[in-house]
């Protein structure tokens, strides 16, 4: 018994149980289409390099055939067309590099079986699904090993269970194929980085030097902002001016190794730069620039929304991490030499994450981009628990009770998410309150969700009741460009050398600001002498951010709705998007691409707001 107390480590058994539970979840919940949406974009580098030998996607027919067969995405946003005929991948190649062993495993499996060796058949999908769990397991193994450097087996076990089952880690690692997303792979890399940082500061040898360089390089190659994780080893052990000086002396003493780390990171990063140079024509390329509706807003971060909103607030859906934030006080008091590297990395990384305009990060549970940081946030959580344990039996049972409640609460909300009770992107406070601790969605509660922005505006209009308010009436009879139309009245003539009607521009926060959501009903009075099917003309609407369009919609005139040789009022419904900035503007124009003239006499725009809306963001 005494020997076991000295040699047995309960955290090893806990880790084994955790891995068995997660592994069972992966094996028993296989998604229908694993290589889809963003994962499809991460992965495209591999089949088009090793199977189709067309990394620039010049033969787009191959892409279209894949989409037709496997239905990987509803629309192809994963690459951007270039004037030279190439396509450039939207996502950096780091994830593809990490997928590489599982891609080759799937390829060999496909070649040895009757499955198509096309990069997307069942062997590839399952190889990546199970291979991603291998990364999860390795990440957790090194995560536990690192925790044992600071805590006894009991505290280590508590922290391990709290992170895996008390946060959004489990849901976004083993269900719905989410283990293939970047947060799982970055958790794996950050776990290795923490372990190698500890070892390097014990013994700055070449093995751990190269490991740190490769890990930072791959992290940045997977998501460029993760270059910030370099601050962990850089500031590790710095607590005050004295230790800062000592750290600088350590860097100078091992300057060759530090230079190698920098060179390795640069070499790995250069892979992306050379790819951009070949296929985009320049080393620096904004692959996210195709959608002006998304981008970094460093001057207007969404800090409160990321933390506390009912839509996707981190501390609403992952309250366990509130203890970790409180634990920074314990970390500062107990191990000040660890505090600054972790705290500064968290603050800067969190600010970057909160600066992304699509701060809810699409369909997910809680804030998925924060998951990799749990590797480091586990330390303040652990020191908080340890300090409370040391204060006596009462505080020990108090913190265990709090942890148990938060753990159970997270597991229940995770269950709600997996069963569609908590929505992946449209949550509101009234809906959250309606389903709180519920095992079924109450009747009528779904009306409290945010509007489904993928739905046809015509269906939205039919399903809700609205108050209408006229925003602008554009009378083109008095426009300087007006000329006599076929019936003698004045109107603007659209023709090949004048294809646009005068644009209407409306600044969102001056004219269109809505509390919940809004539709624009746009009416244009037009006159056609040639059937529109043979003489194309469209009603076009878009939002503009710094002169770049997003949420562009067009509605073509057709023969059925457009009688000839008379004035016809044509109507278009436009769902106002979630604007990137309040000073973004809406623009409408009639766009004519036909050869025969079309006349436009007037345009009216009305704002439709839902009556008695009970939704609150």
Image: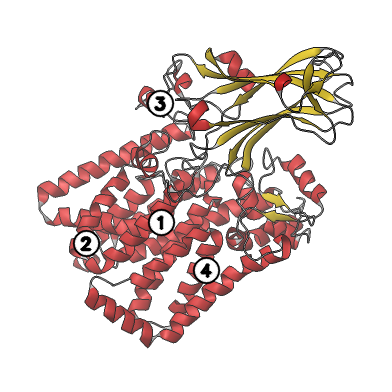
Mark 1, other Cα within 10 Å: few <14 / some 14–19 / many ≥20 = many
Look at the picture and state if 415 lies above or below 54. above
Q: Which residue is mark 1?
A: 349
Q: Quadrant of the N terminus?
A: bottom left
Provide the secondary structure element on which disc 3 rests: loop
Mark 4: few/some/many CA within 10 Å (<14, 14-19, 20+)? many
Quadrant of the image containing the C terminus: top left
Residue 112 visible in the current orientation: no
* Distance from Cα at disc 3 to Cα at disc 2: 38 Å
The residue depicted at 76 percent of the width and 40 percent of the height is 68
Mark 3 is surrounded, within 10 Å at the Cα level, by few (under 14), some (14 to 19) or many (20 or more) other residues, namely some
Q: Image check: 264 left or right of 604?
A: left
Mark linked to residue 332: 2
Asked whether disc 1 touches disc 3, contact meaning CB atoms under 8 Å apart, the reply is no
Q: Which residue is mark 3?
A: 616
Proximity of marks 4 and 2: CB atoms separated by less than 8 Å: no
| Residue pointed to by mark 4 | 217
Name the image quarter holding residue 171: top left
Of residues 29 and 149, the one drawn nearer to the viewer in this rendering: 149
**Label 1, label 4: how many angstroms apart (C-alpha)?**
17 Å
Q: Please give the count of numbered marks on the rendered protein.
A: 4
Looking at the picture, does residue 388 appear above or below residue 450?
A: below
Q: Secondary structure at mark 1?
A: helix
Identified at 17% across, 57% down, the residue is 387
Give the CA separation, mark 1 to mark 2: 19 Å
């Amino acid at each position: 018994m005494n020997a076991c107390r000295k040699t047995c480590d309960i955290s090893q058994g806990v880790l084994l149980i955790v891995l068995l539970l997660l592994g069972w979840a992966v094996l028993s919940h296989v998604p229908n289409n694993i290589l889809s949406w963003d994962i499809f974009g991460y992965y495209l580098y591999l089949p088009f390099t090793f199977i189709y030998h067309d990394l620039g996607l010049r033969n787009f027919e191959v892409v279209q055939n894949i989409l037709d067969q496997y239905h990987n995405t509803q629309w192809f946003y994963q690459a951007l067309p270039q004037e030279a005929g190439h396509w450039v991948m939207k996502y950096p190649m780091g994830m593809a590099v990490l997928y590489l062993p599982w891609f080759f495993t799937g390829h060999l499996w496909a070649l040895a079986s009757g499955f198509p060796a096309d990069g997307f058949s069942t062997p590839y999908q399952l190889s990546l699904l199970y291979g991603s769990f291998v990364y999860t397991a390795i990440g957790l193994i090194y995560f536990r090993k690192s925790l044992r450097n600071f805590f006894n087996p009991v505290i280590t076990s508590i922290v391990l269970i709290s992170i895996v089952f008390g946060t959004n880690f489990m849901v976004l690692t083993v269900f719905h194929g989410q283990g293939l997303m970047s947060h799982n792979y970055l958790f794996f890399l950050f776990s290795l980085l923490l372990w190698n940082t500890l070892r390097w500061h014990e013994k700055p040898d070449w093995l751990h030097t190269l490991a740190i360089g490769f890990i930072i390089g791959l992290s940045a190659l997977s998501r460029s902002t993760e270059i910030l994780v370099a601050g962990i080893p850089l500031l590790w052990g710095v607590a005050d001016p004295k230790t800062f000086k000592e750290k600088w002396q350590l860097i100078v003493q091992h300057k060759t190794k530090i230079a190698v780390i920098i060179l390795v990171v640069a070499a790995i990063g250069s892979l992306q730069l050379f790819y951009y140079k070949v296929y985009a024509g320049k080393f620096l390329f904004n692959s996210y620039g195709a959608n002006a509706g998304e981008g970094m807003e460093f001057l207007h971060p969404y800090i409160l929304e990321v933390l506390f909103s009912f839509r996707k607030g981190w501390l609403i859906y992952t309250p366990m991490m509130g203890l970790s934030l409180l634990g920074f006080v314990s970390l500062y008091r107990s191990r000040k030499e660890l505090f600054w590297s972790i705290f500064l990395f968290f603050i800067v990384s969190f600010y970057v994450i909160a600066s992304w305009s699509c701060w809810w990060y699409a369909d997910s549970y809680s804030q998925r981009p924060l998951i990799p940081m749990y590797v480091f946030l586990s330390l303040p959580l652990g020191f908080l628990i340890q300090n409370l344990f040391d204060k006596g039996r009462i505080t020990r049972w108090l913190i265990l009770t709090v942890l148990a409640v938060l753990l159970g609460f997270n597991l229940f909300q995770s269950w709600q998410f997996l069963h569609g009770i908590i929505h992946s992107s449209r949550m509101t406070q009234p809906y959250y309150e309606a389903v709180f601790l519920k095992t079924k969605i109450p009747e009528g509660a779904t009306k409290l969700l945010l509007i489904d922005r993928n739905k046809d505006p015509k269906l939205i209009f039919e399903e809700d009741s609205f108050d209408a308010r006229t925003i602008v009436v554009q009378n083109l009879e008095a426009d300087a460009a007006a000329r006599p139309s076929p019936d003698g009245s004045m109107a603007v003539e659209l023709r090949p050398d004048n294809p646009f009607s005068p644009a209407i521009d409306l600044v969102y926060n001056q004219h269109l600001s809505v509390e919940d959501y809004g539709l624009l009903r746009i009416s244009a009075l037009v006159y056609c002498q040639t059937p529109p099917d043979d003489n194309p003309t469209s009603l076009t609407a878009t939002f503009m951010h710094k002169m770049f369009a997003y949420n562009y919609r067009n509605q073509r005139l057709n023969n059925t709705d457009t009688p000839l040789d008379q004035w016809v009022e044509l109507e278009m419904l436009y769902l106002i998007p979630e604007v990137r900035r309040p000073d973004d503007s809406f623009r409408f124009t009639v766009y004519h691409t036909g050869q025969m003239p079309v006349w436009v006499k007037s345009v009216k725009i009305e704002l439709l707001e839902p009556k008695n809306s009970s939704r609150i963001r």
